[in-house]
Amino acid sequence: AQKITQTQPGMFVQEKEAVTLDCTYDTSDPSYGLFWYKQPSSGEMIFLIYQGSYDQQNATEGRYSLNFQKARKSANLVISASQLGDSAMYFCAMREGWGGSNYKLTFGKGTLLTVNP
Amino acid sequence: NAGVTQTPKFQVLKTGQSMTLQCAQDMNHEYMSWYRQDPGMGLRLIHYSVGAGITDQGEVPNGYNVSRSTTEDFPLRLLSAAPSQTSVYFCASSYPNAGQGAWAGELFFGEGSRLTVL
């Protein structure tokens, strides 16, 4: 079974509107972390936001927020007020376990977001 | 700050040739890793290292070799390149949990190396 599932290969949004990118995960470890990365057409990987499994509140970073629903095992990325520069591939990723001995991230297959003017 | 540096950025090989993708980081990160990115497949872990002298296999290790003689460097070797190894390769590193404050443990990525095997 896939550990990270991103069911939307592609998404379109109008500039200035909000968009939600879906991510579900599968783990039996009570300690885990969830990440979102952005990859623009130039190819670099940009870290956006992190949510720990024990965090009580949803993570936010500027226009990015993570809608964390632990019981549903979902960690959707919400981008508010979309900008043309948000057009990119977005990856959800998970680290299972806690502590300095485990750094491995497992990635989903990505969602290609296109922001239309 | 240099961060994570990968070389070369582009490479074309013929089937059966060998080559090494270089990765260096100047952030004193313990953890280093190599991923490959293929269309529709996301990023898949090839090999990783939790410190000098320690390496382990990831999800897709076949056809690749690594070593970690220093904290800074983590080269990826293709011993006999195959067309199936045509991909974009990313090196990434991370820092240890110091036990203080929130630790995300996010990966810091290099710019990627695009490899084509003919």
Image: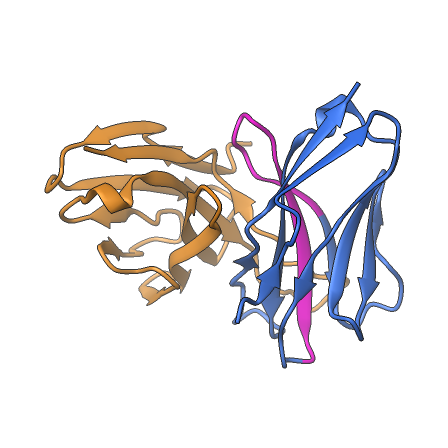
**Quadrant holding the C terminus of chain B:** top left
Residue at x 61% of width, y 57% of height: A93
- The percent position of residue A73, horizontal first and vertical second, equals 73, 70
Q: Residue furthest left?
A: B16
The range drawn in magenta is A30-48
Q: Is residue B4 above or below residue B54?
A: above
In which quadrant is the N terminus of chain B drawn?
A: top right
**B44 to the left or right of A7:** left
Look at chain A in the picture and name its colour.
blue
Drawing shade for chain B: orange
* Nearer to the camera, B30 or A51: A51
Q: Residue B27 placed where, x, y %?
A: 52, 45
Q: Looking at this view, is B70 or B7 the one in front? A: B7
- Residue B11: x and y in percent read 27, 29
Residue ID at (64%, 45%): A37
Tell me which corner region of the image, top left, top right, bottom left or bottom right, holds residue A79.
Answer: top right
Instruction: Residue B100: say if magenta.
Output: no
Q: Residue furthest top?
A: A117
